[in-house]
Image (spheres, grey):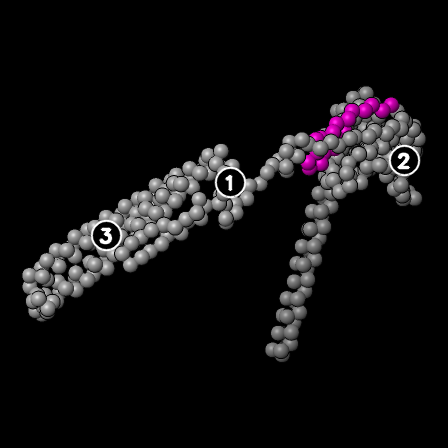
Amino acid sequence: MRGAIERRTIGVGRSNAAIRAGAALFLLASTSLADEAADTATARSLGIEGVMLAEAGKCKEAIEKLERAEKLHHAPTTATRLAECEIATGKIVMGTERLQRVIREPLPPNAHPAFVAAVARAQKALAAALPRIATLRISVNAPPGAKLTLVIDDEPASEALLDTNRHIDPGIHQIEVRAPGYLPSFRSTALADGETKSVVLELHKDPNAQAHAAAPVLRVDSARTLTEAKPSKLPAILAFGLGAAGLGVGVYAATVVQRRSSLLERGCDSKRVCPPDLNPALDEAKTWATVSTAGFIAGGVGVASGIALLILSGASSSSSAPKTKARLRPSFGATSVGLDGVF
């Protein structure tokens, strides 16, 4: 008995869930139908306003109403009147394309008589407007491989339109073509109703782009300096500074060595044998002797390099000097520092 009650309870729960799901779907469908009905009613209201404006000869105002009506709910009646106003305001290509879509759309067998009349009206309007469409053929004389940018009436156009007959509204049109490295080319042309015309645009090299591409590039070679640039004496000055610093260190270290040598001479015997307490002074004298030698070497190299750089900077800045290569090489001896070179 208990199991039967449980089964009955479960069955009732499932039935309630199915009812709730069905109710939810019904509400969603009802909401969708309500929204669609509201859009249709709004489109009908906008369409009536647009048709009244069109019949009053106010096509510019009518287009705005009719376009909004078409976005909310398409109908052959509003589409046909919108296309007629587009044609009346000079947008013949756009209007005729819209009329052709209205004519191609199949109507149901029980279509409203207003829709049937709208399709017949579209056929009549299309037959009258098609002969008014003009044809324009655009060609560009440009080198092969030039990346062209085509603009017609301030609107970008595909390069595929070149050298082909393009349907276009009658009137005055501005054509522009551009390409990297070339001057832009402009052309204005006027077409009458049904007229066919060809225009050719010429692309010419941009002289500024040529000058930029032909600008000489200066290259630095490891064996010579740029004669086009004014030589700087800063490296020579820096070399002299480093040489002076090295010589200063060498002189100071030599002075310390001399002082320690005097101390050792007084404390050591004639055979240069010194007592143990003078060993620190002896080690210090040796260290400062090494420092002095290194300082004099560095100072000599710095001074020699400064002289060489100064000579080279003076020689390269002289326009009358012969164009010969200077080779410099510092030389070192046991007690001397020098400079070998060919000028």
Quadrant of the rendered structure where residue 108 is?
top right
Using the image as rendered, state which of residue 47 and residue 312 is in the foreground: 312
Q: Which residues are magenta?
A: 175-192
Residue 171 or residue 92, whichever sits in front:
171
Q: Residues within 10 Å of mark 3 (few under 14, many from 20)?
A: many
Residue found 85% across the figure and 32% down from its top: 137
CA distance separating discs 2 and 1 = 92 Å
Give the mark, 2 or 1, whose residue is nearer the N terminus: 2
Residue picked out by circle 1: 323
Q: Which of these two is toward me, 149 or 180?
A: 180
Q: Quadrant of residue 315?
A: top left
Is residue 341 rendered to the left or right of residue 107?
left
Which amino acid does the dot numbered 1 rest on?
Lys
**Disc 2 and disc 1 in contact, CB within 8 angstroms:** no
The secondary structure type at the circle numbered 1 is loop
Pick whichever of labels 3 and 1 is earlier in the sequence: 3
Rendered position, 3 above or below 163: below
Q: Regarding mark 2 in the picture, which secondary structure is present there?
A: helix
